[in-house]
């Protein structure tokens, strides 16, 4: 069975702000403000923003 990667915690509830996280060599951040929601044209403030994708990622290599 393939090893499953642990998904990083992106929001520190005590600080009410999201953290930048590295996951599978990609850089992610939670959408946590109306400003980010508006800037990215999102309907809700739920989800993540992908800031960087590892160039050796299977998604990049297969042009997914």
Image (cartoon, grey):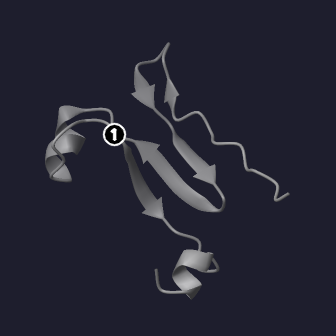
Q: Point out the residue furthest to the right here.
A: 1
Which residue does the image show at 48% across and 17% down from the upper left?
13
Residue situated in front as seen by the camera: 62 or 34: 62
Residue situated in front as seen by the camera: 43 or 25: 43
Residue situated in front as seen by the camera: 47 or 36: 47
Side (left or right) of 9 relative to 38: right
Give the vertical position of 62 relative to 23 (above or below).
Answer: below
Which residue does the image show at 58% across and 86% down from the upper left?
61
Which residue does the image show at 32% across and 33% down from the upper left?
32
Give the vertical position of 14 relative to 4 (above or below).
Answer: above
Residue 54, quarter of picture: bottom right
Q: Which residue is mark 1?
A: 31
Side (left or right) of 7 relative to 48: right
Which residue does the image show at 65% across and 62% down from the upper left?
25
Side (left or right) of 13 relative to 4: left
Q: Residues within 10 Å of mark 1 (few under 14, many from 20)?
A: many
Residue 21 on image: x %, y %: 57, 45
Residue situated in front as seen by the camera: 1 or 43: 1
Q: Point out the residue furthest to the front here.
A: 1
């Amino acid at each position: 069975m393939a090893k499953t990667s642990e998904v990083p915690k992106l929001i520190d509830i005590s600080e009410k702000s999201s953290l930048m996280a590295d996951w599978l060599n990609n850089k992610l951040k939670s959408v946590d403000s109306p400003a980010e929601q508006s800037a990215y044209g999102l309907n809700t403030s739920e989800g993540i923003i992908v800031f960087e994708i590892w160039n050796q990622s299977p998604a990049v290599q297969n042009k997914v």
